[in-house]
Amino acid sequence: MSTVTFADIEAAAGRLEGLAVRTPLIESPALNAELGARVLLKPETLQRGGAFKFRGAMNRIQQMSVEARARGVVACSSGNHAQGVALAARMLGAPAVIVMPADAPALKVANTRAYGAEVIHYDRYSEDREAITNRISEERGMTIVWPFDDADVIAGQGTVGLELVRQAEEIGATLDVVLTPVGGGGLLAGVATAVRKLSPRTAILGVEPEAFDDTRRSFESGRRETIDPAARGICDALQSPSPGAITFPINRANVDGIATVSDADVAESIRYAYTTLKLVVEPGGVVGLAALLSGVVDVEDVTVGVVLSGGNVDPSLFSRILAGEL
């Protein structure tokens, strides 16, 4: 079984130097007052491609041989990994094919194509995206860049946690709690590995939508659970079918718990981020903040780091959320 070490994350940080954005930590007096806590936000909304996914994709593709890059890469994603892979591939001169759900946000599809990737759609409720990805890989000789179940991808995502702890130290803050979104678990696994090494006393929590609580249930049962195929929700970035074979054991070893939030909590937090924090955050990217604002996670009198994992929200959905229609 593959795993990821802190040394892997440090090596990834070296590869990403000058390529990935070292996103800032930002602090809002209004949010601190609202929660009675010190909240340090890590806006990966400002990352290349609009989400943290660029980090893992670049770390993975960068290590491919020249010959493999020439043959290209294929990935499956609802949008943020798609954009990260497409952008990293373009920067490194590799063709890219992305398998995306037919109902993926139009903005994410358009951005993926704008980065030069070929997009192939599938029905996320009746077709197997991994089977489609494997078939394209075999037919075209392309290397698969999995969205979360890949050690190099996880190590790249772990640089978010590396930066988070070190940036907090730079301003004299000690993190009591860190919250990060969880879908397939790649971001959480990387962040947890880095935080556990650099700040062992920090509590690490993953946050996922109530309807897609496969990681929470997996923690309870001790085995990888799957989501209900009939489940629907607005957090398109967090709808992976189950925790990854690589990510799940890493997260069980390092993560203190999993919280869940409702779509209503998510929508309210998107509005709060826009009106009060002046940030545009997509539904899947805002769940950590939603866990705080909804009271699901109580952080009164502590210092908490929150990863805002992406900002690629479809304009039509965003406008409906701001108008209070969701």
Image: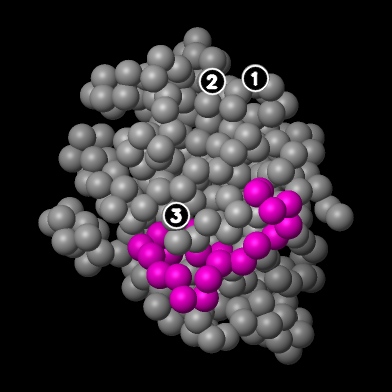
Q: Contact, CB < 8 Å: mark 1 with mark 2?
A: yes
Q: Is residue 209 left or right of residue 250?
A: left
Residue at disc 3, secondary structure: strand
Of labels 1 and 2, earlier in sequence is: 2
Residue 237 sits inside the magenta stretch: yes
According to the image, label 3 marks what residue? 209
Q: Is residue 217 above or below residue 197?
A: below
Residue 77, percent from left and from top: 54, 69
Q: Write the start and end of the magenta stretch as one range.
A: 219-240
Badge 1 crowding class, 10 Å Cα cut-off, few under 14, some 14 to 19, many 20 or more, is few
Report x, y in % for residue 181.
50, 47
Q: Are marks 3 and 2 in contact (CB under 8 Å)?
A: no
Q: In this view, which residue lies farthest toward the front?
A: 221
Decide if residue 292 is on the left or right side of residue 134.
left
Give how far apart the Cα atoms at labels 1 and 3 are: 26 Å
- Can the viewer see residue 304 in this picture? yes
Q: Which residue is mark 1?
A: 201
